[in-house]
Image: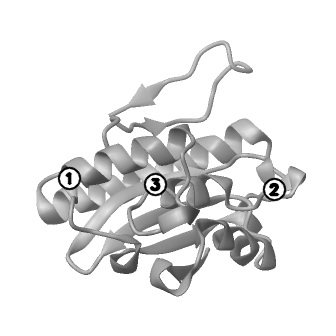
Amino acid sequence: MKTFTITLANLTSPREICPLLEARKCKYYNYTFQYNFGVIKFGKAADNEWMAGTWGNRLYRQAGGINGWGSYALHDTSANKMREQMNIHFPTLTRNDVTITVYDYTDELVGLDEKEIDRRLLNEEHELIKKHVEDYGDTPKLNIQCTKIRTKAMFDDFFEVEYD
């Protein structure tokens, strides 16, 4: 796994995130939105938007919902949801306070099928959240959904066993 950080204060537009991921050929990743005092949220991305030329689609859409972009702010579903949650839990933060850490698993996951890539990234996200709970006693404010460890599907996807 390779990691890198994107400082939103250094960008003019959330769209500038896309070429940063494209330059690294970063297709399959987990990420952390954070600020000086902690984690805002953990997430994962294993979409194929990069095939259509939109690298980092999930990141730039969520980042586009953080206050402080002015006329470059995004207003799609992902951005609006991020904006709503940021206004509730972090009303004074702007993009100038936020950095994103990207955990790039592309090299480790290349050649696997989409379900396996998604399963592994979901498990990595779960581990990040679990560690945060162990260290701080709670999930990050914007990690609303419960995560679970997903084991490998048995019998060609007839069923899947999940553990908390």
Residue type of the residue flagged with mark 1 = His
- In the picture of the structure, the residue carrying the numbered disc 1 is 89
Q: Which of the marked residues, 1 or 3, is nearer the chain's N terminus?
A: 3
- In the picture of the structure, the residue carrying the numbered disc 3 is 65
Residue with the most extreme top position: 158
- In the picture of the structure, the residue carrying the numbered disc 2 is 50
Residue type of the residue flagged with mark 2 = Trp
Q: Is residue 66 above or below residue 126?
A: below
Residue 143 position in % (x across, y down): 33, 46
Q: Which of the marked residues, 2 or 3, is nearer the chain's N terminus?
A: 2
- Disc 2: CA contacts within 10 A as few (<14), some (14-19) or many (>=20): some
Residue 30 position in % (x across, y down): 54, 60
Determine the image quadrant of residue 91. bottom left
Q: Is residue 139 visible?
A: no
Question: What quarter of the picture does the C terminus occupy?
Answer: top left
**Residue located at (53% from left, 80% from top):** 6
Q: Is residue 164 left or right of residue 117?
A: left
**Label 2 to label 3, Cα distance in Å?**
21 Å
Residue 63 position in % (x across, y down): 50, 61
Which SS class for mark 3?
loop
**Residue located at (61% from left, 61% from top):** 29
Instruction: Please identify, in this view, whether the residue under mark 2 or under mark 1 is nearer the observer.
Output: 1
Question: What quarter of the picture does the N terminus occupy?
Answer: bottom right
**Residue located at (67% from left, 54% from top):** 57
Residue 35 position in % (x across, y down): 30, 75
Residue with the most extreme left position: 137
Q: Is residue 115 above or below residue 26?
A: above
- Disc 1: CA contacts within 10 A as few (<14), some (14-19) or many (>=20): few
